[in-house]
């Protein structure tokens, strides 16, 4: 991969952005109900999970091993996010190995009860299975399945009807066919509808809204899974966290969210994107991460002042998802990245972005703490992301940048120029007038006064 030969220099080290212990501490963890475990330090419990996990305080490491035996790929339920007020949590995992015979596992059943009790709730634990019901039933034939009422009486199960990676891949292929190389404008709307792309975006957003609302308004802990817990599960947990936690709407916070929920928790980037693989017909390829970014863009359109980052930030992430210029999205898991020494031998995408943050900053951003955002996930409010999908087609893409945003950026540049001149004048005056520091304002104080007017 080119990433291993890339010798670019950046002022920021993007590999320092995400520290799992720091992120859990930001959430107020560990506490008396949740603990950090290093049982997976050498990836012995689960080779597709990160080395550091947060689990219920009352569950021992031996309990975790027994639960792992009953979960696909050993991906046990672990904490992704905790609500600062209700203490309700978002857990993620893979499907239980129920099979056609309806197998049960007392350790798994007890473990979900421990999760339910951890925030003191008396209502049932909510389990969101991302799959359509019929698919979950079909998975029993290959040893998978879902949590039945008999085995899990203290849990409620809901299916979210999000289709699998193969359906999403075919949908994107249809979308590609209508945007390149030519589009018959007379059939544009019907052609777009036939791809079902926006329907899939709607289902993912709808599912994430349900997860976020249950945790925030319903004050109930939730468990999210699909089949293996690295595709649809990552979409749902990360979007729900974005809706509930304003930190993830900052540039740094979003980088942390991607590193945590997607990269460290084993979304199979190498398989889904096909880095270095010329077999374009590979059945493992699928635009799962692209869908997530599309959902984020839809949210940013509905809440234009809520996100610190702009559209260019999202497009840059997607461009380098495929470019292999950085090591950020290489390989399928944290264990493989560690083995290949990715953080030592390659650069992080966040190094590029954080070295020129102004380029990716939304000028209309207004910082708001602890405000939950619930987008409207209806077809009337969703639109095709033209500036991404059709940016290379000059007949369709928007030719001019947003004039309001452009003018705002010009004003910001003007402000920065005035601040620079002010600093220069201050330095010149200080050198001419002895002991002037006591009577005059510092450059930083004057800067803050100027900045308040913008």
Image (cartoon, rainbow, N blue to C red):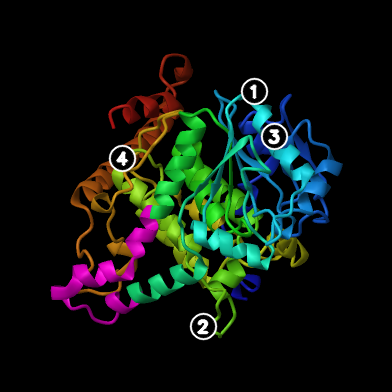
The residue under label 1 is: 120
Are the residues tagged 3 and 1 within 8 Å (C-beta)?
no
Can residue 436 be seen in the rendering of this structure? yes
Determine which quarter of the picture holds residue 108: top right
Task: State which mark lies toward you, 4 or 2.
Answer: 2
Q: Which residue lies furthest to the bottom in this view?
A: 278
Magenta segment, principal secondary structure?
helix
Residue range highlighted in magenta: 176-202
Q: In 3D space, how far apart are the residues under numbered discs 4 and 1 (Cα atoms)?
A: 40 Å
Question: Relative to 220, does residue 307 appear above or below in the rendering?
Answer: below
The residue under label 3 is: 113
Question: Relative to 141, does residue 121 appear above or below in the rendering?
Answer: above
Q: In 3D space, how far apart are the residues under numbered discs 3 and 1 (Cα atoms)?
A: 11 Å
Determine which quarter of the picture holds residue 448: top left
The residue under label 4 is: 364
Q: In this rendering, would 412 be left or right of 372?
A: left
The residue under label 2 is: 280
Q: What element carries label 4?
A: loop
* Dot 4 or dot 3, earlier in sequence: 3
Question: Relative to 361, does residue 163 appear above or below in the rendering?
Answer: below
Give percent across and percent down for residue 155.
60, 38
Decide whether residue 273 is among the magenta residues: no
Q: In 3D space, how far apart are the residues under numbered discs 3 and 2 (Cα atoms)?
A: 44 Å
* Dot 4 or dot 1, earlier in sequence: 1
């Amino acid at each position: 991969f080119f990433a291993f030969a890339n010798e670019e220099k950046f002022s920021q080290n993007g590999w320092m952005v995400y520290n799992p212990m720091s992120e859990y501490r930001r959430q107020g963890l560990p506490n008396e109900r949740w603990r950090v475990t290093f049982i997976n330090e050498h990836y012995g419990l689960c080779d597709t999970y990160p080395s550091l996990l947060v689990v219920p305080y009352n569950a021992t490491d031996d309990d975790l091993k027994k639960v792992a035996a009953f979960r696909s790929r050993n991906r046990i339920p672990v904490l992704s996010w905790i609500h600062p007020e209700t203490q309700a949590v978002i857990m993620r995992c893979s499907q239980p190995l129920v099979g056609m015979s309806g197998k049960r596992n007392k350790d798994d059943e007890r473990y979900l009860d421990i999760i339910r009790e951890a925030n003191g709730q008396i209502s049932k634990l909510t389990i969101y299975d991302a799959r359509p019901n019929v698919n979950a039933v079909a998975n029993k034939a290959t040893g998978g399945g879902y949590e039945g009422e008999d085995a899990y009486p203290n849990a409620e199960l809901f299916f979210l009807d999000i289709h699998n990676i193969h359906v999403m891949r075919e949908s994107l292929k249809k979308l590609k066919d209508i945007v390149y190389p030519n589009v018959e404008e007379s059939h544009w709307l019907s052609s777009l509808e036939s791809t079902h792309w926006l329907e899939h975006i709607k289902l993912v957003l709808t599912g994430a809204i349900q997860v976020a609302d249950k945790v925030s308004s319903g004050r109930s802990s939730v468990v999210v899974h699909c089949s293996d817990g690295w595709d649809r599960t990552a979409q749902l947990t990360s979007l729900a966290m974005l809706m509930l936690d304003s930190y993830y709407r900052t540039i740094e916070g979003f980088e942390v969210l991607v590193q945590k929920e997607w990269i460290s928790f084993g979304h199979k980037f190498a398989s889904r994107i096909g880095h270095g693989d010329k077999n374009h017909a590979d059945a493992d390829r699928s635009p799962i991460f692209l869908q997530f970014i599309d959902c984020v863009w839809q949210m940013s359109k509905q809440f234009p002042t809520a996100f610190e980052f702009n559209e260019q930030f999202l497009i840059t992430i997607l461009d380098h998802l495929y470019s292999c210029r950085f090591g950020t999205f290489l390989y399928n898991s944290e264990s493989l990245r560690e083995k290949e020494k990715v953080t030592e031998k390659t650069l992080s995408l966040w190094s590029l972005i954080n070295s020129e943050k102004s380029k990716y900053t939304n000028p209309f951003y207004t910082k708001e703490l602890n405000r939950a955002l619930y987008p409207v996930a209806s077809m009337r409010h969703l639109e095709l992301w033209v500036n991404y999908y059709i940016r290379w087609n000059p007949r369709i893409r928007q030719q001019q940048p947003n004039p309001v945003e452009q003018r705002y950026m010009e004003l910001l540049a003007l402000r920065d120029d005035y601040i620079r001149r002010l600093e220069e004048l201050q330095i010149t005056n200080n050198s001419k007038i002895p002991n002037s520091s006591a009577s005059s304002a510092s450059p930083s104080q004057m800067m803050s006064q100027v900045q308040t007017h913008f």
